[in-house]
Amino acid sequence: MTLMPRRRAGLSALAAALLTATPALAQTPPTLDRGDTAWMIVATVLVLLMIVPGLALFYGGLVRAKNLLSVLTQVLAITCLVAVIWVIYGYSLAFTGESGLIGGFSKAFLAGIAPDTLSGSIPEYVFLCFQMTFACITTALIVGGIAERNKMTLEQFGQHMKGMGVDIRTMKNRFKAEMSWREVVRRRFGHLISITERDVDQLMANTSVQAQGDLELQVQRITFPLPGAVDQSVIAQRIAEADAVARKFSGCASLPALAANAGGRHEDLGSRKPATIPEPTRSLLLNARDGDLLPASVSNGGVELWALCGRKAENSARENAQAELRQQEFDVLAQKHLKDLRQDASIEIR
């Protein structure tokens, strides 16, 4: 009977000792461990090498040689972008806050993190960089998924499309029907389509600046200078002189003699890009035919007469423009022909 109270007293003393020792252990401040820090730095470098060049070269080997540089650039760009996002708010959302799903912005832009701030036994900057490498490699795997799909065979592609609810046979039949319909339209209306050089020039002038960049205009100019004090009568007289020269114009070769007889200044400007010619002269030259003389116009230098003596363009650009015009004409005729077929069609019920 005397042993039981003694045992209870001993257990009570042991529990009291443990309770008093626990706060002391919990209050022990974290200390920097050089071994842990060195290993985490090595691990961070190894994971980074797994991304660039490891992952980039691995997925680059799954595509054609001409696409290798593209895959390398995509992996590098994704890695750089995720690294910036991780520093701005990714680390804060992942490792702060009390929620188990997403954190807060208390450490956005690495707020509150100093070189001597520790995360366990390693600097928090090392821990941040280590976790950042895994965020980078996770997103870089997306490029790998795209590269792997580029190596699909026709059967694999068909299975993939079937899994998305698309029948590959329906796609094949649709493509064949479109190709057959285009061939029908070409054979029926091909002789009705005529694309002129002027149409090609207008398309190249109106579609894009890049098309104009491939075009060069051979231009000459006659300028009738105006005096310092200009009134409407002087301008009208100069315009009348320019109109008289325009009536005698018989080609670009006659411009020097006409300018000398009329007292104007002749300039052979040679090949000029349309972008270097001011408006509205540029649009008039682009819409003019070779050998045309534009109407007289007034500028800061005086009354001017512009002549289009020729034009040069890249063959590829002109061929693309011509093909585009032909395709537009074919589309219009195809829609019209289809409308006529629908109107003339008859449904017989038996």
Image: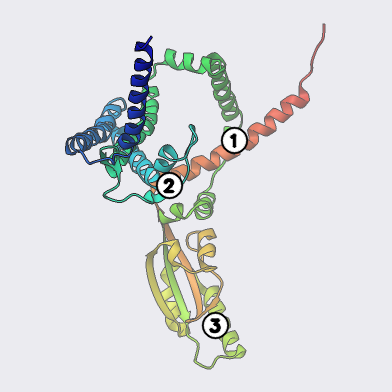
Q: Is residue 306 above or below residue 328?
A: below
Residue 292 drawn above or below residue 187: below
Q: Amino acid at mark 2?
A: Ala
Q: Is residue 152 left or right of residue 305?
A: left
- Of residue 3 and residue 225, the one placed in the foreground of this image is 3
Give the answer, above or below, for where 9 lies relative to 69: above
Give the mark, 3 or 1, whose residue is nearer the N terminus: 3
Q: Which mark is residue 330?
A: 1
Q: Residues within 10 Å of mark 2 (few under 14, many from 20)?
A: some
**Observer-nearest of 188 and 258:** 188
- Identify which residue, 136 or 30, lies in the foreground: 30
Quarter of the image where one finds residue 66:
top left
Task: Point out residue 183 in the picture as x, y percentages from the top left corner.
Answer: 55, 25
Q: Quadrant of the C terminus?
A: top right
Q: What secondary structure is found at the residue carrying circle 2? A: helix
- Which tag is nearer the camera, tag 3 or tag 2? 2
Residue under label 2: 317
Q: For mark 3, what is the residue?
A: 241
Horizontal and vertical percent position of residue 253? 41, 69
Looking at the image, the residue that sits furthest to the top is 350
First-in-chain label (1 vs 2) = 2
> At 38% across and 24% down in the image, what residue appears?
150
| SS under mark 1 | helix
Marks 3 and 1 in Cβ contact (< 8 Å): no
Report whether 335 appears left or right of 127: right
Is the residue 97 above or below the residue 182 in the image? below
Instruction: Measure the alpha-carbon separation of dots 3 and 2.
Output: 40 Å
**Residue 45's image quarter?**
top left
Identify the amino acid type marked 1.
Answer: Phe
Q: In the current view of this chain or complex, which residue is farthest to the right?
A: 350
Secondary structure of the residue carrying numbered label 3: helix
Quote the CA–CA distance across marks 1 and 2: 20 Å
